[in-house]
Image (cartoon, grey):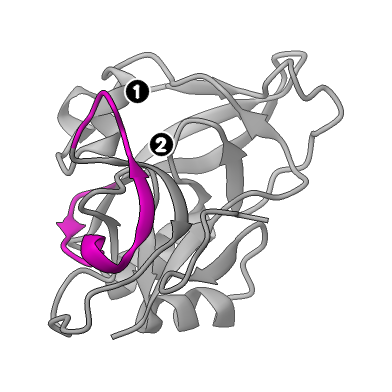
Amino acid sequence: MTFWVLSSRNDGAVLDAYPEGPDGWRYLEPQPLAHEFRAGAVMGFSPSFPDRRKTYDFVTNVLGLQVVSERVRRVVSELAPQDAEFLPVTLVDHNKDVVSREHFIMNLLHRREAIDLEHSDVVMSSILKTEIQFVHGLALKRDHPSDGSHVFRPVHLRSHAFVDVTLREALVQAGLKGCRFLAAHGWDGDED
């Protein structure tokens, strides 16, 4: 089975702070957060990137989150309703003016054993010993059950989202803007 790294790095707005609510690290764990997520949550454009104002279907952030549009929510909810929950956020620009009320944090609810650590060229974190800190060349396990999650965070690399072929094709066909799909097998850690 083929997997793709979902990269939302683009020329649009950049988010650099979590909304009020659950602690930031909890978004990187496969756990539902909707029951404690605050209604009316706001995420603002980063003052470090004052010229970046566009919003796309995938919004760039430095938090390891997937911040996505209503269009993405519809595609994922149709194909993979058990794989993610969608936490509504209001996006505000550098002047605190509302630019979108139709974006969500796509909180991924599953992790999969997809990475072959023995054959990967990676540096493990000195703090979180089981997590990869730097990727130089990623190798995937060869035997993947086809009935697993369509979108997930891989075990050992929780700061990234992977999608399978089915979901990748659906997202591409939907004409969504602001994301790229990088082949996970052989990936060198670069998102550009």
- In the rendered structure, does residue 95 fall within the stretch colored magenta? no
Q: Is residue 129 left or right of residue 172?
A: left
Q: Are marks 2 and 1 in contact (CB under 8 Å)?
A: yes
**Magenta residues, start to end:** 108-129
Asked if residue 116 can be seen in this view, the reply is no
- The mark nearer the N terminus, 2 or 1, is 1
Expressed as whole percent of the image width and height from the top left, the position of residue 9 reads 64, 49
In depth, the one of 116 and 12 nearer the eye is 116
Residue at 73% x, 15% y is: 47
Q: Which mark is residue 39?
A: 1
In depth, the one of 51 and 88 nearer the eye is 51
Mark 2 burial class by Cα count in 10 Å: few <14, some 14-19, many 20+ = many
Expressed as whole percent of the image width and height from the top left, the position of residue 69 reads 53, 51
Q: Which residue is the site of mark 2?
A: 88
- Placement of 64 over or under 170, stated as above or below: above
**Of the residues shown, which amino acid type is indicated by label 1?**
Ala
